């Protein structure tokens, strides 16, 4: 029941990137569950990862490999998260890297491993190793949609985004895929996101752009407030578009890239929310009028996490009292409730901390009916703001998460 | 579907307390929805209230009246929370106090008003005022169960607890009622709780005991992480049992009272969890081995709030990876995940941050089957601990909260 999620876009080949997909039978037979990205020599590769202390084995390996060698391959499996697996989980992740390294003739450190799926089960190394040759044989520039399908878990649809732009006569492409539908409250990155471009850019600059952009995209979405152990987001710049390598995020070309990159990152983050487990609404929570940005951010997340607000959204019930109750417990220092205003899809519902004098319940019901809901909460304290995207809380969410392992 | 909630106990009359109940038709006809407590002259009356900035009008009036006069009556309505109602909500609460004050011949400040129910609707003052005479005519020492029924909203059963104890030949009674099933994550007190005793005790001493005990009972339960705007907990000591008035919480009689009082407070708090909206499990989350108590408290609450943990509890699924993932994001400074242990109903599931070597999935499934689940999470960092009580997250929760206003 994805909400307004568009078909997977046509993503052209990006110079320097080839993708191979295979069926390893990790959790289910006849499902694409293994994806290999091949990145050309000289590509800048950077990443951000989960802040969860129980980060998964592949996340630890990625962080080590990123600093010890130039990355040439990404190896992604779905169906098993290789998290909560201790020392043997690290060994398992390394073994899969070794197998791919042998198959393609690079060092094991040139490979970044990623896993997503059930937590706490041993990674089926043998199945992955056995499927690596078919994934390598499948390498091609045109496999973006297969890759989107190959990293899905409880996602109902593959998620991709692409933007092209021109600068001084040269064409550039930015494209990516993402996955994730539950255990989504990223803290530095989402479940899995991969964004590639043919632009030439210093890794340091790309890292700073990724870190900033993730705070306007993956780090501003939440489905159920649970931060995954496997969140990883990777950005790649292959450098084959033809530009002089970018050394500063302030260069005019860098600014054009940031605009396209931000659009792709936001589209991929929104796609995760639109496909949120059990989602029937796509909800934008915008908090304005804060004294400091942190107040806007935390208030927006508190609204987005409240089970009572989320079930009211599911019911299309303009139960604005629940939203104000959340604002009241969000811990905003110096909040004067008499200055709080609330709009939903353009309808003024609360003014001066109580129901708007002109508000009619019928208007609220109409405002809550669409699939796309835009909540604007004005704290009335200053001019800082922030926006978070989320879903409602439905029967389907309970069903999915009560039955996920069975 | 209350979980192991026992029948309302037989509560004897407490000297100095009379209770009257009436049907005011506030939200539905033919439902007890108005309760009056009459407290004898000289009773010590103290309270703790919600910390939500959007606290309801009656909470503000209570806080004012408690300091400006000796309390003689409590006036409680269900069906309407009189919250988010601004200035006119305050006027409405005061009008109901005035009406009761006139009927019984005390000052309006001697009355504490309480409301619970839908947020944001104007309080139907006329209906309440019209029903006050029947509530007053109904005053009797034996109406505890009617009072328990009269303060229910989405509760499925009335909640009461009583303990008697003897000290130096004198018998003492501590009894109370509570209500609440959703929007439960009290912060200083729960939705509504009233505990009365015939003991003679200074108000200051009673206040300090209440503040301490609430942190071992109402402030350690959570159903859906949403702090109500109306949380109020009142303790009354009528002073008619015959003891010399207690002036210190360290007196031997005070210690005996605290033991009984704590049992009543915990029983009332647990009753709210057992009757939690859609609850099919009563879950005790005990975090031990913390370096500081705050780490234990916040980790326990994070586990208790996680939608993924709660849906796994609903499914009786020993999905321990979800619990460890929550521990990893709980923000415990210096956590070494390799020292974390997890037991569920006595079965060791995780050791050294991963699955226990001897653990079999079958054992986990058996451990998760009962209605009463006891999770013990050892952080392996020190000797501080805390316990929180909660419920699972079921289809019924979504149904109740998506349909509450219709």
Image (spheres, coloured by chain):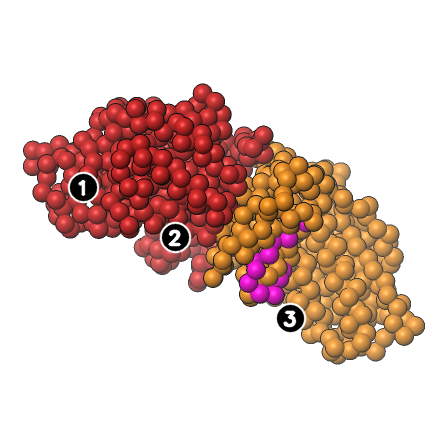
Chain colours: A red, B orange
* Mark 2 in CB contact with mark 3 (< 8 angstroms): no
Q: Quadrant of residue B90?
A: bottom right
| Horizontal side of residue B94 vs A313, given as left or right | right
Residue designated by label 2: A296
Residue designated by label 1: A42
Q: Which element carries disc 1, helix, strand or loop?
A: loop
Q: Quadrant of residue A101?
A: top left
- At 78% from the left edge and 52% from the top edge, which residue is drawn? B160
User: Residue B382 lies in magenta, yes or no?
Assistant: yes
Residue designated by label 3: B68
Q: How far apart are marks 1 and 3 (CA)?
A: 76 Å
- At 86% from the left edge and 65% from the top edge, which residue is drawn? B165
User: Residue B222 at x, y = what percent?
Assistant: 61, 51
Q: Main secondary structure of the magenta part?
A: strand
| Residue in the foreground of this view, choosing between A342 and A129 | A129
Q: Which element carries disc 3, helix, strand or loop?
A: helix
User: Residue A52 at x, y = what percent?
Assistant: 44, 50
């Amino acid at each position: 029941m994805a909400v307004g999620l568009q078909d997977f876009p046509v993503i052209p080949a990006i110079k320097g990137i080839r993708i191979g997909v295979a069926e390893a039978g990790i959790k289910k037979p006849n499902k694409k569950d293994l994806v290999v990205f091949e990145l050309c020599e000289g590509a800048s590769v950077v990443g951000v990862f989960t802040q969860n202390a129980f980060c998964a084995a592949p996340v630890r390996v990625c962080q080590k490999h990123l600093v010890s060698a130039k990355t040439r391959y990404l190896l992604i499996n779905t169906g098993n998260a290789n998290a909560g697996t201790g020392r043997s989980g690290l060994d398992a992740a390394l073994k899969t890297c070794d197998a791919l390294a042998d198959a393609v003739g690079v060092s094991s450190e040139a490979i970044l491993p990623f896993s997503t799926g059930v937590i706490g089960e041993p990674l089926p190394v043998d199945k992955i190793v056995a499927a690596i040759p078919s994934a390598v044989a499948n390498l091609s520039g045109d496999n973006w949609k297969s890759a989107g399908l190959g990293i899905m878990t409880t996602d109902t649809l593959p998620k991709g985004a692409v933007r092209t732009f021109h600068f001084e006569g040269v064409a550039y492409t930015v494209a990516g895929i993402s996955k994730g539908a539950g255990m989504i409250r990223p803290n530095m990155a989402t479940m899995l996101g991969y964004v590639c471009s043919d632009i030439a850019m210093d890794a340091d600059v790309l890292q700073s752009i990724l870190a900033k952009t993730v705070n306007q995209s993956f780090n501003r979405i939440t489905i159920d407030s649970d931060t995954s152990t496997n969140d990883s987001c990777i950005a790649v710049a292959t450098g084959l578009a033809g530009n002089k390598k970018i050394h500063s995020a302030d260069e005019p070309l860098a600014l054009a890239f940031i605009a396209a990159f931000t659009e792709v990152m936001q589209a991929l983050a929104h796609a995760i929310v639109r496909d949120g487990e059990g989602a029937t609404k796509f909800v934008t929570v915008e908090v304005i009028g804060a004294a400091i940005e942190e107040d806007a951010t935390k208030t927006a997340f508190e609204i987005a996490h409240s089970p009572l607000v989320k079930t009211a959204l599911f019911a299309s019930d303009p139960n604005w009292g629940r939203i104000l109750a959340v604002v009241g417990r969000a811990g905003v220092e110096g909040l004067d409730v008499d200055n709080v205003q609330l709009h939903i899809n353009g309808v003024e519902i609360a003014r001066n901390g109580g129901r708007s004098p002109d508000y009619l319940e019928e208007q609220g019901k109409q405002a809550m009916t669409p699939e796309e809901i835009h909540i604007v909460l004005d704290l009335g304290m200053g001019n800082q703001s922030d926006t978070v995207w989320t879903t409602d809380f439905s029967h389907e969410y309970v069903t999915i998460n009560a039955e996920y392992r069975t």
